[in-house]
Image: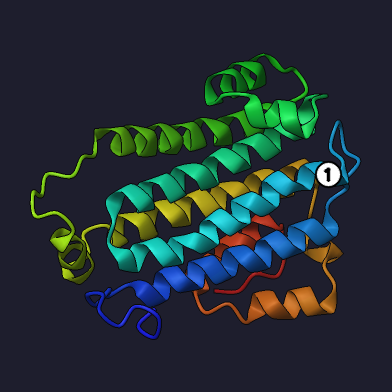
Amino acid sequence: MEKYFPYSSKIPNEDKIYQLVCENNLMVGIILSNMDASRFYLNEEKLIFYRRYRDGVNKILIYIPLNDEIGIYACMRYSIEQLLKFIYSIYFEKNIADISRTSYRYIKEDIKKNGNIDTYIKECLLKLYTYYANYSNDLHDKEVTCNKELDFLGNIIQSENEFANGIEKDLRNILILSYKIMCHVFDIKYNLLNVSERSSLESLKSKGGKRKIYSILKRDDITE
């Protein structure tokens, strides 16, 4: 981040956020490679929502050093929304255009009434709904109070970052929820992964994050 945002204030946990984004890219790649793209109403075309979710998470690395809460909250909300739309696309016989137009409210209501979605998935989704609502409320509450025209932009970038710690915690939880949902829906387990995928997982820096992923993938030989 320092390379591309030299005037941003120092972000103590920037490496942890960066590692989370890299972890998510790895897991999305593994999930895309091992999922059954014909499950329920899913098809190759609908994968765009999952890729948009991945891209939204990646863009957090742009908004964090800008220290702009509106951009950060919008990016987090967008990422969750695309993940919800992808999950919705799996269980409902609608095309991409219709899903894109379906609001969060109707996604939530339709999923609640759908008997093909098991309790485990719905419980994970309840937690995602909370994050979506929180970031939506935060986004709507923001306004610019500075009256110095564009001078405040430089002040924002150079000010102490107040959002990085909260974003790291929320992002970590959101990513774990996404892994749980996707691996459960598509029955993706560690023993189905190829050598390259296993090696990439083993190279993850966060031991705690790695253990959680191995647990989700039902790896039997997890060591402390």
Q: Residue furthest right?
A: 38
Residue lying at 57% horizontally and 24% vertically, measured from the top left: 103
Residue lying at 32% horizontally and 38% vertically, measured from the top left: 139
**Residue 210, can we see it?**
no
The disc labelled 1 sits on which kind of residue? Glu
195 vs 121, left or right, is right
Crowd around label 1: few <14 · some 14–19 · many ≥20 (10 Å): few
Residue holding disc 1: 45
83 vs 132, left or right, is right
Closer to the camera, 6 or 130? 6
Give percent across and percent down for residue 162.
21, 59
Residue lying at 15% horizontally and 66% vertically, measured from the top left: 155
Is 3 rendered above or below residue 118?
below
Q: Quadrant of residue 135?
A: top left
Numbered disc 1: secondary structure:
helix
Give percent across and percent down for residue 169.
37, 56
Q: Residue furthest front?
A: 149
